[in-house]
């Protein structure tokens, strides 16, 4: 091979290498941002199908795809929509993917008003604590509790809920979950909640002799 031929071979090899370096990332790096956007936008279309059974089937397919971004969009779409059956399936998908929910206990308006009024009056404070002894227990836990669902698998309608190492069985009926387990030092508590169109889980908490209290947690 003479010098000219060698230079031609070297030039050709260099050109191929540069071309490969420029094209390979685009070929192996997955869809473009535009294509990805179209994929995500399609989720909303899938869950707006006029056939309610197809909406459920599409939701199930999205969950099983394992695509976290598609699931996020699907949950938001389902929770804000008016299809209760779709919200029920979204609740199960949420439990399977997030595994835990932290609730805030909301005082009834009259109890909250009495508590606020008692802050500047020692006598009123003692009266309040005597009338509403459960409030001290709530305060110790910052009026919050967490439910975990470590072993839950989509789309089961029952399983085990956990809170601070204590377990209790739960059942999902439609779009409502109910469970009974020991929370903090509050005793055995009955908890029920459901997703709402306000992108929240809302329900009630009843522990021993306490009155039934409202609970809420952000869904997204």
Image: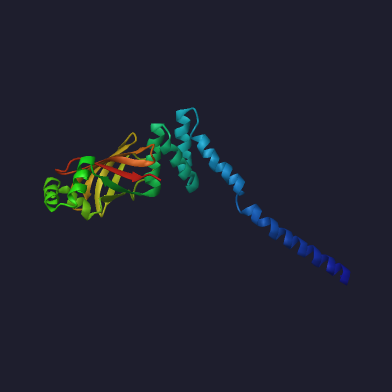
Furthest residue toward front: 120
Q: Position of residue 132 (x, y in %)?
A: 15, 46
Q: Nearer the viewer, residue 165 or 100?
A: 100
Q: Position of residue 58 (x, y in %)?
A: 48, 36
Residue 92 figure quarter: top left
Work out which residue is located at the far top of the displayed protein and give it.
51
Q: Work out which residue is located at the far bottom of the displayed protein and give it.
A: 3
Taking depth in this image into account, of 64 and 106 the one nearest to the observer is 106
Left or right: where 140 falls relative to 64: left
**How many labels sit on residues?**
0
Q: Could you say which is closer to the camera, residue 214 or residue 75?
A: 214
Q: Nearer the viewer, residue 135 or 76?
A: 135
Q: Residue at x 76, y 65 (%)?
A: 14
Q: Position of residue 75 (x, y in %)?
A: 43, 41
Examine the rendered structure and indicate whether residue 107 appears above or below residue 23: above
Camera sees residue 47? yes
In the image, taking residue 30 as reference, residue 57 lies left or right, namely left
Does any portion of residue 186 appear in the rendered image?
Answer: no
Structure colour scheme = rainbow
Place of residue 94 in the rendered image (x, y in percent of width and height, measured from the top left):
39, 44
In what quadrant of the picture does the N terminus appear?
A: bottom right
Q: Residue at x 12, y 45 (%)?
A: 131
Q: What residue is at 46 percent from the left and 40 percent from the top?
A: 74
């Amino acid at each position: 091979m003479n010098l000219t031929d060698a230079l031609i071979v070297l030039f050709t090899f260099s050109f191929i290498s540069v071309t490969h370096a420029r094209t390979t990332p685009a070929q192996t790096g997955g869809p473009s941002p535009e294509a990805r956007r179209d994929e995500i936008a399609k989720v909303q279309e899938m869950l707006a199908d006029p056939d309610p059974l197809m909406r459920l089937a599409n939701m199930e397919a999205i969950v099983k795809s394992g695509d976290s971004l598609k699931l996020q969009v699907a949950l938001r779409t389902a929770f804000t929509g008016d299809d209760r059956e779709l919200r029920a399936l979204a609740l199960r998908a949420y439990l399977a993917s997030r595994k835990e929910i932290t609730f805030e206990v909301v005082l009834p308006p009259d109890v909250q008003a009495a508590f606020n009024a008692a802050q500047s009056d020692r006598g009123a404070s003692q009266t309040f604590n005597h009338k509403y002894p459960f409030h001290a227990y709530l305060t110790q836990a910052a009026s919050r509790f967490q439910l975990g669902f470590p072993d839950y698998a989509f789309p089961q309608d029952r399983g085990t809920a956990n809170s601070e190492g204590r377990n209790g069985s739960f059942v999902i009926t439609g779009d409502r979950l109910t469970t009974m387990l020991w929370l903090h030092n509050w005793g055995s508590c009955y908890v029920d909640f459901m997703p709402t169109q306000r992108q929240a889980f809302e329900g009630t908490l009843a522990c021993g002799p306490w009155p039934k209290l409202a609970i809420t947690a952000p869904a997204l």
